[in-house]
Image (cartoon, helix red, strand yellow):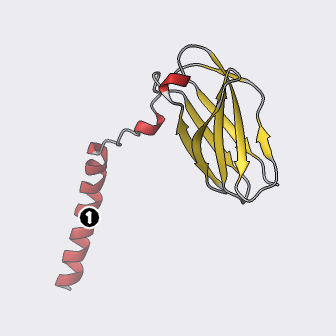
Amino acid sequence: MRTAFSLLTGLMLLAIVAPARAAEVRPERDSSKVADTTKTIVDVRNQGFLDAVVYVIRDGGYAQRLGTAIGNTTARFVLPAHLSGGLNSFKFVVHRIGGRNDSVSDEILASRGDVIELTIPPY
């Protein structure tokens, strides 16, 4: 009987203390959701099975590799600083590893602080 009483008392104390403690807990700040106005971000959502290499072309210049977007995932790339000053026109080239053709996006206007979202559709 004493064990049941102490168990019940412990549960009652927990019911009183837990909500008070929960009120003290502050959520951590998620730095990935805070806007960064000094960088241009490219979020690539790869809906295909094949991994894809993503390149950026600024104002009709040469293609610069951003990185690899793994199949069925979302990858985040930061444009190099020398490409993202002021308002620029970008095109993106996607080369599917093991695929037959490369895909080229339409021109996209962006500047520092913008987030560009690209979706690679499945085959």
Instruction: Name the outermost residue toward the front.
Output: 62
Q: Is residue 36 above or below residue 68?
A: above
| Residue beneath the point at 70% across and 34% down | 92
**Image x and y of residue 40, in percent:** 54, 27
* Amino acid type at mark 1: Met
Report which quarter residue 84 is drawn in: top right
Q: Estimate how packed mark 1 is, as few (under 14), some (14 to 19) or many (20 or more) residues with alpha carbons within 10 Å.
A: few
**Is residue 83 among what the camera can see?**
yes
Q: Nearer the viewer, residue 6 or 22?
A: 22
Does residue 27 lie above or below 79 as drawn?
below
Q: Is residue 108 left or right of residue 7?
A: right
Residue most toward the top? 86
61 or 17, nearer to the observer: 61
Relative to 67, residue 63 above or below: above
Residue 94 lies, in percent from the top left, at 71, 43
Is 97 left or right of 6, judged from the image as shown? Answer: right
The residue located at (77%, 56%) in the rendering is 99
Residue 35 lies, in percent from the top left, at 47, 27
Image quadrant in which you'd find residue 17 = bottom left
Viewed as shown, does residue 92 lie left or right of 85?
right
Residue with the mark numbered 1:
12
Quadrant placement of the N terminus: bottom left
Instruction: Report the quarter where the C terminus lies.
Output: bottom right
Work out whether residue 113 can be spotted. no
Q: Residue at coordinates 45% horizontally, 31% vertically from top-left?
A: 34
Local secondary structure at mark 1: helix
Which residue is located at x 69 percent, y 38 percent?
A: 118
- State the residue in front, 1 or 7: 7
